Amino acid sequence: MKQDSKDDLTLREELLAADDLGGEEITVERWGKKIWVRELNGAERNELFEKSMERGKMVGEKLFVNAVILCACDPETKKRIFAFEDAPAVSKKNGVSLDEIATVAYRLNGIGEYDVKEAEKN
C-alpha cells in the first residue's frame, strides 16, 4: 500500500514498533505456582491453530494442550515453560490446572467460544 504522507509513514512505524503483547499472571491452585499467561503475536496464533489441526479439522484436545504450551510462561522471565515436544506429558497433567491456563489463554488471544466448540466437535 502506498503511503500518502509523512504522517502515515510515522503512524506505520509507530504501530510496527509498538509493544502490544501483554499477558496476565495467574496462580494455578493445584500446582501452587504462579504462571504468566501471554498473548500471542499473529504468527504464533496461526501456529496454534495449525498445530491443533488433524485431517483438515481443528481438534479440541490439541487446541487445549497447545494453548497451554504456547502461552504458559515463567512469570519472572516471561519465557515459555513448555515446548511442543512436551505435549504428551502436558496432556497428562491435572485437567483443572490446564483449564485454568487455557481459559485465560483463550480470552487473551481472542479465541472465542465458537473456535473451541468447533475444535471439540472434531
Image: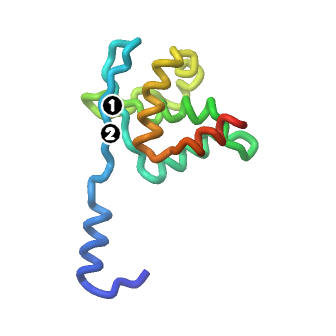
Quick one: quadrant of the N terminus? bottom left
Q: Quadrant of residue 59?
A: top right
- Numbered disc 2: secondary structure: strand
- Numbered disc 1: secondary structure: strand
Q: Amino acid at mark 1?
A: Trp
Nearest to the observer: residue 34 or residue 29 = 29
Q: Earlier in the sequence, mark 2 or mark 1?
A: 2
x and y percent of residue 106 in the render?
A: 47, 39
Q: Quadrant of residue 3?
A: bottom left
Residue 6 numbered tag: none
x and y percent of residue 74 in the render?
A: 32, 27
Q: Is residue 115 left or right of residue 20?
A: right
* 96 in relation to 61, above or below: above
The reply to whether discs 2 and 1 touch (Cβ–Cβ < 8 Å) is yes
Q: Residue at x 25, y 28 (%)?
A: 76
Q: How many other residues sit within 10 Å of disc 1, few (<14), some (14-19) or many (≥20)? A: many
Mark 2 highlights which residue?
23
Q: Residue at x 37, y 33 (%)?
A: 37
Q: Is residue 118 left or right of residue 103?
A: right
Q: How many other residues sit within 10 Å of disc 2, few (<14), some (14-19) or many (≥20)? A: some
Q: Is residue 48 left or right of residue 6?
A: right
Mark 1 highlights which residue?
36
